[in-house]
Image (tube, helix red, strand yellow):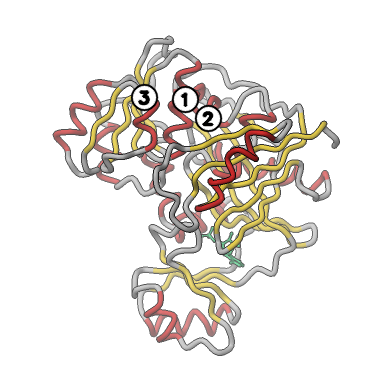
């Protein structure tokens, strides 16, 4: 269902997923006077700590989903692996944003790249792979180095492996668990950037400035804004984001990851949700990506994406969370912790946004 009319403060928003993104969405919703009902399978979900209601149940518990749908005015989600039948079930009962069509495209790397390329937007050369003989044919076509990724359920570098001169097709196929896959040409990029874009039910679009992203061990470490790229390149990236979000008939905030190679842009993937590389907007913009998402899905006018400061977002991973007092003592630094008890290695525990006066 689509939203019939803008939601007034006091309405309840349903969120699938109880991690840090759900938590920060719930916090932003609270600022606008909404309450949130979080639906997640894990009893210790960080988002539960900051929301009015929660349900602990699996995403295929349709009795629990029925009750959830009845209790909320709109449903959104914080992760892209919401099962398709769950999204369809909810969408037949209550407004769902982003809708199940956009979700489906973003969930499958082959569908996603086919869609993006169909708009004339550059992506790495790719081929669908369903077995080892097909992988051998795809390597012959696309060449080495290349990257083999599972079509679905990959994140933070999981479910992917690089194919170099030495890698055998059999080893690569085993490495990704023999799951339906995509082979992509390896892009020798200069930089990784992303664009955070939002679109309302009325088709209005808002796009933030472009961050430059640095990863360590496949996990985002920093986002620096503005990215150190030519002004035309960042405008071209933002224009691509506008085209993509419009063509998907998308409602909400979306993250689009891109590679920059010289003056060329290549889209890597779309995340149908608020995105880690947009966390800097919490402290450097008038309206954060989280508030923007809530505005969009609730039928409010989109807010300004204006950035008042330069900013570097640092993810706080694992044991780095022990440095909380140093972060707290730093000037011009927004501190955000996610309420996670256990600081496992590489786990996203929080982030800081370090502000400096705006230049460029
Ligand atoms: P992904 O899961 O698609 O976001 O990929 C995770 C990371 O792997 C990206 O942020 C890149 O650093 C790297 N990567 C993914 N695909 C490619 C590619 N086709 N060429 C080069 N590097 C890639």
Horizontal side, residue 274 vs residue 181: left or right = right
Name above or below for residue 90 compared with residue 294: below
Closer to the observer: label 3 or label 2? 3
Please tell me whether mark 2 sits on a helix, a strand or a loop: helix
Q: In which image quadrant can residue 17 be found?
A: top left
Horizontal side, residue 46 vs residue 273: left or right = left
Q: How many marks?
A: 3
> Is the residue marked by circle 1 packed among few (<14), some (14-19), or many (20+) residues within 10 Å?
many
Rendered residue at 67%/47% (across/down): 223
Q: Which residue is disc 2 drawn over? A: 290
Horizontal side, residue 227 vs residue 40: left or right = right
Q: In which image quadrant can residue 226 be found?
A: top right
> Is the residue marked by circle 3 packed among few (<14), some (14-19), or many (20+) residues within 10 Å?
many
Please tell me whether mark 1 sits on a helix, a strand or a loop: helix
Q: Which mark is residue 27?
A: 1
Q: Nearer the viewer, residue 16 or 349?
A: 349
Rendered residue at 46%/59% (across/down): 109
Distance Cα–Cα, label 3 vs label 2:
15 Å
Rendered residue at 40%/77% (across/down): 175
Residue 265, how many percent across, how many down? Answer: 70, 56
Ligand 1 shows up in the quarter that is: bottom right
Q: Tag 3 or tag 1, which sits nearer the N-term? A: 1
Q: Is residue 116 visible?
A: yes
């Amino acid at each position: 269902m689509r939203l019939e009319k803008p939601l007034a403060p006091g309405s309840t928003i349903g969120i699938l997923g109880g991690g840090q993104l759900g938590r920060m969405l719930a916090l932003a919703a609270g600022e606008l006077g909404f309450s949130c009902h979080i639906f997640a399978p894990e009893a210790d979900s960080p988002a539960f700590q900051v929301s009015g209601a929660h349900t602990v149940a699996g995403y295929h518990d349709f009795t629990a989903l029925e009750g959830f749908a009845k209790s909320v005015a709109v449903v959104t989600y914080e992760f892209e692996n919401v099962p398709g039948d769950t999204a369809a079930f909810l969408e037949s009962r209550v407004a769902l944003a982003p809708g199940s069509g956009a979700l489906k495209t973003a969930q499958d790397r082959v569908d996603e790249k086919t869609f993006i390329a169909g708009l004339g937007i550059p992506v790495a050369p790719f081929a669908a792979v369903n077995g080892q003989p097909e992988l051998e044919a795809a390597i012959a076509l696309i060449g080495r180095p290349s990257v083999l990724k599972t079509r679905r359920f990959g994140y933070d570098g999981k479910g992917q492996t690089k194919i170099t001169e030495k890698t055998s097709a059999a080893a690569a196929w085993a490495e990704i668990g023999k799951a339906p896959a995509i082979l992509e040409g390896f892009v020798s990029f200069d930089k990784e950037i992303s664009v955070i874009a939002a679109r309302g039910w009325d088709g209005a679009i808002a796009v933030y400035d472009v961050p430059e992203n640095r990863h360590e061990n496949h996990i985002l470490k920093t986002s620096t804004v503005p990215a150190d790229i030519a002004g035309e390149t960042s405008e071209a990236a933002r224009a691509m984001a506008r085209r993509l979000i419009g063509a998907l008939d998308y409602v909400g905030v979306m993250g689009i990851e891109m590679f920059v190679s010289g003056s060329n842009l290549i889209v890597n993937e779309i995340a149908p949700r608020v995105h880690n590389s947009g966390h800097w907007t919490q402290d450097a913009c008038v309206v954060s990506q989280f508030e923007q998402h809530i505005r969009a899905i609730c039928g409010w006018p989109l807010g300004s994406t204006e950035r008042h400061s330069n900013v570097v977002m640092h993810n706080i991973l694992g044991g780095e969370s022990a440095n909380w007092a140093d972060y707290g003592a730093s000037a011009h630094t927004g501190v955000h912790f996610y309420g996670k008890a256990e600081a496992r290695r590489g786990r996203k525990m929080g982030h800081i946004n370090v502000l400096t006066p705006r230049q460029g």
